[in-house]
Image (cartoon, rainbow, N blue to C red):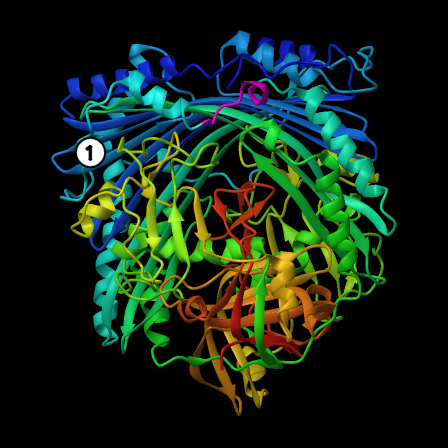
Amino acid sequence: MLLDPGLLSRLIGRALARGGDFAEVYVQRRKSVGFALDDGVLRDASAGRDFGVGVRVIRGAAVTYAWSDDTSDAALLAAADVAGRVVHDGADGQAVVIARPLSLRERASHADPSRPPGEISLERRAALVRRADEAARAAVVDHGARLVQVACAYADVDEEILVANSEGLVVSDRRALCRLSVEVVVDDDGQRRSGSGGGGSRVGFDHYDDPARSPEAAAREAARMACAQRGARPAPRGDGVVVLGPASSGVLLHEAVGHGLEADFIRKQTSLFAGRVGEKVASELCTVLDDGTLPGQRGSLNVDDEGQGTGRTVLIDRGVLTGFLTDRHNAALLAAARTGNGRRQSFRHPPLPRMTNTFLQKGTDDPDDIVRGVRSGLYCRAFGGGQVDIANGSFVFEVKEGYLIEDGHLTAPVKGATLVGNGPETLSRVTRVGHDAALDPGVYTCGKEGQSVPVGVGLPTVRIDGITVGGTG
Amino acid sequence: MSRVPALVDDRTAAEGLAQALVDAARRTGAAACDATVGTSASLTVTARDGTVEEIGRSQSRAAALRVIVDGRLGFATASDAPTTPAEVDELVATAVGLARLATASPHNVVLPVVARSTDEWRAAGDALDTWDELTAHLDASWASAQALAMERIVRGHDGVTGVRDVSASCRRGVFALATSTGFVGALRGTSAALSCSAVVQDGPHKLQVETGWGAARALGRLPKPAEVADDAARRALARRGARRVSSTEVPVILDPSMSRAFFAGVLAVIGGEAVARRQSFLQDAVGRHVLPPGHTLIDDPLLPSGLASKPFDGEGQPTQRRVLVDDAGRLTGFLLDGRSAARLGAQSTGHASRGATSLPSPAPTNTTLLGGRGDLASIIASTKRGLLVTRALGRGADPTTGDLSRGVAGFWVEDGALAFPVEGITMAGNARQLLLSLDRVGADVDERSALRMPSVRFAAVALGGS
């Protein structure tokens, strides 16, 4: 165990010594390795280690959180003391909760690594970026393009966590996460076009043995995307028909709808979805789920960072709002069920309700047919950055790879396009949903209140009638 | 009420550990190396419904070692800094082991440093006034009182229906650097911040949220809770009834916050890293006009009490005030650290930015645009018809092309006055052309962050709307 069970019990006892409803200790030991290769030069080889403990005490709606990366008994007991000073009417309260004896809980196995990266030699891990670099150069030549730059990066995390709380729960987990990214820039008559590829999962290093997920495949995808955008025209401006391509377009769903369904925004009444369970918020073609149990996916977990088993939560069922994503604290305050979405970036952070893998369920339409049915519109295959204003649902997304649709065919690539809209309004304008549901290749990291966690996003091909395209054309 | 836990502002201890890491690395044959040590303590209190909602405290002591062995770079970090010789040796072994896997490059350098003693650096740091004893000792009762006051005041405004995040925080930290070229020095700093967001109902399923905030090195320079709360409430209330406008091309005014976001994108691409990667829309702009004449863009790492002030950079190079764009509007050069300078065949400009567990990378310090006149109000008053932008969604300009397309919200300006709030539209253009089209610059520099920008106006920008 990461921390002696006797010490865990003492920490929980100390944390509750001045009162409180609940106390929790989170222990994390993490090893990470990263390689960055630019212009054929393996520029940085880096490794980090991290070991620390976070103590949380809850009393009513108040939460105190203290953490320490000094893991001596004395320092940890001091952190528990600090967390135990829950502010309440300026006076110390009585201990209202007696911590139950700790007992180790079994956990499910949705995201166990088959080969944790920590067990692979550094040489083999570094070889991934060299292979990707070589393959990207060759692919650009094959496309007849002039290469400006290739940048490849690989990073992995191999960690153990342990959660123990005053309800007697003790759960430990081992988590792996690998990610490879390839960025290719090619010349287009003096202008630059870029493309990206890569991905990863919680499967461990075996992920890259699959030819479809190899460094070479990632490099070819990055080169394809960059080269396909040569001759891009300025995007047309105005409202129109947009077709979202499968998989990566799910980032739109994550930003424009998913965040508004996280229980903290609901509790604080700052989400436009607050108080609307049972209402129609999207077209009946839309069923939206969050599922942390998908085997090995980037957003999957055996247990969340509060020790709760992850689950499959239906957020929107055929257009009707059905649920929220909760952590322990917000579920208690909202008298809602826990969904296993209490996640944190590290022991330095208290848990928040966060998404895992969030996606739109597949429909019945043939994806090619969806495009053929559009006389004039924009097809979006990949997105760059995006942002959402949770209070009113407005969002903005940069289209990284997009094409004009003219008479049912994809024609010229476009540049400088952004999609601007409102989450529920956009979902209510979904008129066709393809049968080609897919998750992204494992590249997304979601940021919220300064905490980053890996997530998965997904979407089948979708047609939206009426979304604003901001462009320069 | 408790004090922030045990003092961690011991510069001597941090310097000692950094030096020990360098000594150990040199003993194993890493002739060129440097080490960083960072310690910090912080406290954040949030308020909701008249009570303290969350108290967060942290204490951290992290270290990192960069070694260059035969031109190959290895880098190892530890969030729990080594405390024993065995742990020091382990970090060294990790860094050296990694270096063997990297490619040798002449751009990997540990720069020579000027001869100055640790005490002299300490005096130089003290002169910059980045440490405030009062702020260093702020406690949870201070933070609770500030947060509770802001929450009460913001809820007292008619029409404010709720709050999102209301918080008060304080932080103090030490950063030490030692290099194999003989540099040993440490910096310390304090900061405090207030933040308050007001929620206003705007129709059945729509809310408007605006945040007021303040940040400073010292408590004495922090705005009062009432100023922050009133600002949030006023701005959120003003957004009620926001609507779209049709696509058009008009003058666009950026308030100081939006101006800061725009110039952050510009400064990123005069960073040597972007230039060396050929991902800068100002790649070829040194010596050329990038701004209309009459304004200067200044980077001043020696600004007293500045949020990014420091006498030496992350590679031990002395820092100095620098004109980035001169008053003829010409870009004078790039911001360089050791590696980007080597890649571009130039000298470091002392702009290596570095955290306790990160590699150096070039970045601006305290930057400001001088030479303006008037303020936001006078710029609005001089605008016949246009858009004032107070919010933006989405990323800024594409670093390589400068192409920019963002979702924006703000206020429509008609006959020199605000007519109605606007939202759900986009502005598009090219950042390099926009820079040259600046036709008004205010003197109302916003000092709440290291990037201190005034209100500005672009002559004509394409807006995408209904």
User: Which residue reaches farthest left?
Assistant: B70
Judge from the rendering whether residue A272 lies leftward or rightward of residue B443; answer left or right: right
Give the crowd class for mark 1: few <14, some 14-19, many >=20 residues within 10 Å.
Answer: many
Any part of residue A68 in sight:
yes
Please state the horizontal and vertical placement of residue B327, each as a whole percent of the image. Answer: 36, 59
Return the chain for callout 1: B
Q: Quick check: A429 above or below A207?
A: below
Any part of residue A311 in sight:
no
Please state the horizontal and vertical placement of residue A452, each as a whole percent of the image. Answer: 53, 42
User: Could you say which quadrant of the image residue A26 lies in?
Assistant: top right
Q: Quick check: B324 above or below A146?
A: above
Q: Quick check: A333 above or below B124?
A: below
Judge from the rendering whether residue B204 lies leftward or rightward of residue B25; answer left or right: right
Residue B132 inside the magenta-drawn segment:
yes
Q: Which residues are magenta?
A: B129-136
Please state the horizontal and vertical placement of residue A7, each as a whole percent of the image. Answer: 58, 10
Please state the horizontal and vertical placement of residue B38, each as a whole percent of the image. Answer: 41, 24
User: Could you say which quadrant of the image residue B331 lies in?
Assistant: bottom left
Residue B295 inside the magenta-drawn segment:
no
| Number of residue marks | 1
**Would you name the residue on which mark 1 appears?**
B110
Residue drawn at x 50%, y 73% is A417
Pick the front one: B299 or A396: B299
Q: Amino acid at mark 1?
A: Val
Residue drawn at x 81%, y 65% is A280
User: Could you say which quadrant of the image residue A27 lies in?
Assistant: top right
Pick the front one: B252 or A154: B252
Q: Secondary structure at mark 1?
A: loop
